[in-house]
Amino acid sequence: MSARRVRPARLVLSGAFVAVGVLLTAAPAAAATNPVLDIEGDTDLAASLREATEVQGVCYGYTLEVDDFDTGTFDGSFAASSAGPGRVAAAGAGCPRGVVQLRARITYTSSASEAEDTASWSLQSTLPALTISDVEQITGTSASGLLDDAKSEDVLLNAVLSLPGLASEQAGVPPLVLDPAGEAAPADARATGTPGSDWTRENGSALVLCGLALLGAVVAFVLSRRRPAQTVRPGTPPSDLTPGWPRPGGDPNPTTTHPWSPG
């Protein structure tokens, strides 16, 4: 089975605890728990989407249907949108340009079952040319990430927050980009006009100097390897200054014996 959020263990009642079990059974059922986003996450997400709607005139949101065949703790429907946490995005006067909504579903199988947990999602959009494949491509994620407790929240947030940017690029609505933290880009933000890595642009001068220094070292090495080696003839010393050998024009029969000469 896939990784999932920790679920409460089943309560086994017997003997003197039967009465308590009856009381628990009679008590009102608690609200289902969203296995991906808590209420605070939904609230922050709704606030970011509301900013996008104010600029673009498009309402955004997500819905999550959970079928929990294990404990039932997460069984239910969850949503957040430009209209607020717990509310589904719907066409209306507040959405003059349309509605774009991510629809996800998670199925938790029984612990006794050998079947795997599953997750899927789709995109519901009144804007043309927007598909769930676009969302997956721009975020580098897929619905299966919703089953991973370590990253399910980021997967859902990034997918939903990518919608305003996609609508701007492919449907012609005013540009707006929301980062994964849910903060809108500043009003005076503009493109630098120089695509590529920001780190490279900021450290360009240092990179050029390093490159020149490396090039100089390579050239010096190549030149040193190309210098002709000194040729030493047999029977002659490696240098005319070697002790024990006559200098040019000197005594051809020196009395000094070279340290390494025979005898």
Image (cartoon, rainbow, N blue to C red):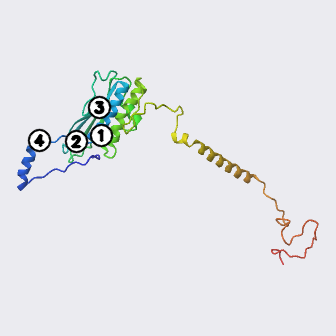
108 relative to 186 in the view: left or right: left
Marks 2 and 3: in contact by CB < 8 Å?
A: no
Residue 9 spot, x, y in % from top left: 19, 51
Disc 2 residue type?
Answer: Thr
Image coordinates of residue 162 in percent, x first then y, are: 38, 33
Q: Earlier in the sequence, mark 1 or mark 2?
A: 2
Which residue corresponds to mark 1? 41
Badge 2 crowding class, 10 Å Cα cut-off, few under 14, some 14 to 19, many 20 or more, is: some
Which disc, if any, is residue 33? 2
Earlier sequence position, callout 4 versus callout 2? 4
Apparent side of residue 125 relative to residue 20 in the rendered image (left or right): right
Identify which amino acid the numbered label 4 is placed on. Pro
Residue 28, by quadrant, is top left
* Residue highlighted by disc 4: 28
Q: CA distance from mark 3 to mark 1?
A: 12 Å
Q: Which residue is mark 3?
A: 81
The residue closer to the viewer here, 157 or 47, is 47
Identified by mark 1, the residue type is: Gly
Q: Secondary structure at mark 1?
A: helix
Q: Point out the tag, 4 or 3, that comes first from the N-terminus.
A: 4
Distance, label 4 to label 3, CA atoms, is 28 Å
Name the element at disc 4.
Answer: loop
